[in-house]
């Protein structure tokens, strides 16, 4: 019995010792840092920081640090596949990405200097390539990633690497990646034996040199003579409002369809020398409402629009975008009073414009400036009251918004707008806030305040209500598109057509 007891005690102690050996600890000495410790134990310093609950990178001599099992970490972080380029674009800074790659310090320093001086070589990203690490989302890094998309798609990248270390930025999505090229030594040349008998070498025609292979970005695709990209965009929105002072309430709505057609033939991506892309579409808007005095109205209008969108990189390296649309609208307005029998119908032809400028000022911060206007060119009226005159439907507005990304799914905006209506000499202030879910669903509150008006008693009045908008965009590619632009496409992708 005593022997059995001693056997179990011995096994328990051995099990405890083996468990203790499974956990690695490191006692910090003078001169240690998380990076050198991680390199010593073949573990990432971020994992050591996370395993010990460190908020920063400061450690002290004598401190005992738990070293996570690198093999266990490899099971969760190694072997990921990159299946959709641009599906999860990197939103952090280039310096954060390079500093957190497992590169030698001297290589990191030189790569960052190359980025600052824009020293790079053109590179390609194809399906089946393997990378040591790739950035994804907001300050995330995946280790040992293999690309797995359609083999016919080729993406252009900038290589800021040094020697056999390749550090690239994919222009389409802004992701960073690196890998180390294995240097293969050429085979040793065998010295042929010396023959005493002279060898007769037959005369051969001179060899025709092969054509010089151009860099990937200038390489022509023989199978496809042109590259056509169509972007179909559908936007719609509606909102309700009420004004308790005038006992009025109503609803407004708008909808538009836009088609963007880009031709990549001969490197020309659009108009104005290929720097801007044309857009055509259809725009519609309207509103309806009623008052407690039994007066109600309903207006709607529809017409074509045409314009362009230009996207590039600002001097600070962040993208900015300009969009301008010219619109025409045929509008019908009907109003009536059910108590008195009064009614009227108006038809108007309007010319309008919409201009917008977006500029990114930080990885998760962007400013938006815009202006919109309508000119009433002509109008007619059919009214039951002979004293009625056709109204002027002209109006202009200018506004600004600040955009903030909170996560990969959610963002928010705060905006203010000044509007002017010549018909009633009306000046109004609009304040709005919106929550944005995955850049297709927007909702929030709206507040309007009348600053001045020719209508007696209108100044100081206000109305409020919620709104919801949808922005649906689907990109259709004919056969395939080879990305060739350095600035337009990555910036356009980051802006996501706000």
Image (spheres, rainbow, N blue to C red):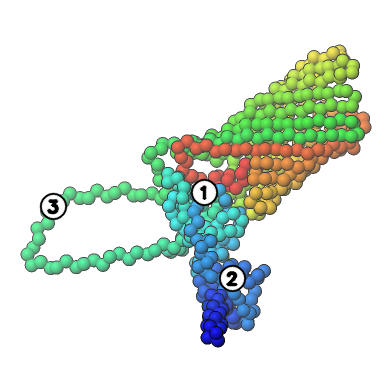
Helix, strand, or loop for circle 1?
A: loop
Q: Position of residue 489 (x, y in %)?
A: 54, 45
Sequence order check: which comes first, mark 1 or mark 3? 1
Residue in the foreground of this view, choosing between 311 and 186: 186
The picture places residue 402, in percent across and down from the top left corner, at 72, 48
Helix, strand or loop status at disc 2: helix
Q: Which residue is most to the left?
A: 197
C-alpha distance separating marks 2 and 1? 30 Å
How many neighbours does mark 1 have within 10 angstroms: few (below 14), some (14-19), or many (20 or more)? some
| Camera-side mark, 1 or 3 | 1
Q: Give the side of residue 382 with respect to residue 24, left or right.
A: right
- Residue at numbered disc 3: 203
Q: Which residue is mark 1?
A: 85
Query: Which numbered mark, 2 or 3, is in the foreground of this view?
Result: 2
Q: Is residue 253 visible?
A: yes
List x then y, in percent, for residue 346: 77, 19
Q: CA distance from mark 1 to mark 3?
A: 54 Å
Tell me the residue at 71%/31% (across/down).
254
Residue 48: image tag: 2
């Amino acid at each position: 019995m005593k022997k059995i007891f001693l056997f179990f005690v011995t096994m328990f102690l051995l099990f405890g010792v083996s468990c203790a050996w499974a956990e690695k600890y490191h006692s910090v000495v003078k001169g240690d840092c998380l990076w050198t410790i991680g390199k010593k134990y073949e573990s990432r310093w971020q994992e050591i920081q996370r395993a010990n609950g460190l908020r920063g990178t400061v450690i002290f001599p004598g401190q005992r640090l738990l070293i996570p099992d690198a093999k266990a970490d490899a099971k969760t972080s190694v072997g990921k596949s990159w299946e959709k380029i641009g599906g999860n674009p990197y939103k952090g800074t280039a310096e954060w990405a390079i500093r957190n790659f497992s590169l030698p310090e001297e290589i990191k320093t030189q790569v960052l200097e190359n980025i600052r001086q824009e020293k790079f070589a053109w590179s390609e990203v194809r399906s089946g390539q393997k990378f040591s690490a790739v950035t994804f989302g907001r300050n995330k890094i995946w280790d040992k990633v293999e690309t797995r998309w359609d083999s016919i798609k080729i993406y252009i990248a900038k290589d800021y690497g040094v020697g056999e270390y390749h550090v690239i930025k994919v222009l389409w999505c802004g992701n960073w990646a690196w890998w180390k090229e294995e240097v293969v030594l050429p085979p040793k040349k065998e010295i042929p034996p010396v023959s005493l008998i002279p060898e007769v070498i037959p005369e051969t025609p001179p060899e025709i040199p092969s054509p010089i292979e151009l860099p990937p970005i200038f390489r022509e695709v023989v199978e496809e003579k042109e590259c056509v990209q169509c972007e179909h965009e559908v936007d719609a929105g509606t909102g309700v409002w009420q004004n308790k002072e005038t006992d009025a309430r109503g609803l407004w709505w708008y909808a538009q369809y836009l088609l963007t057609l880009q031709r990549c033939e001969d490197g020309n991506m659009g108009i104005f020398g290929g720097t801007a892309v044309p857009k055509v579409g259809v725009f519609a808007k309207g509103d309806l409402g009623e008052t407690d005095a039994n007066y109600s109205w309903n207006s709607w209008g529809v017409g074509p629009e045409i314009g362009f969108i230009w996207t590039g990189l600002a001097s600070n390296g962040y993208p900015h975008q300009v969009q301008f649309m010219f619109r025409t609208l045929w509008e019908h307005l009907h109003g009536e009073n059910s108590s008195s029998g009064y009614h009227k119908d108006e038809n108007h032809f309007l010319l309008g414009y919409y201009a917008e400028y977006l500029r990114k000022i930080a990885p998760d911060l962007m400013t938006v400036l815009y202006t919109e206007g309508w000119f009433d060119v002509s109008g007619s009226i059919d009214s039951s009251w002979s004293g009625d005159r056709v109204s002027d439907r002209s109006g202009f507005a200018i506004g600004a918004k600040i955009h903030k990304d909170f996560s990969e799914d959610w963002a928010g905006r705060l905006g203010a707008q000044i509007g002017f209506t010549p018909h009633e000499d009306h000046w109004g202030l609009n304040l709005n806030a919106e929550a944005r879910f995955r850049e297709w669903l927007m909702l929030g509150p709206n507040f309007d305040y009348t600053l001045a008006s020719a209508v007696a008693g209108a100044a100081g009045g206000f109305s409020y209500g919620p709104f919801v908008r949808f922005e649906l965009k689907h990109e259709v590619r004919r056969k395939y598109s080879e990305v060739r632009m350095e600035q337009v496409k990555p910036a356009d992708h980051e802006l996501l057509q706000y």
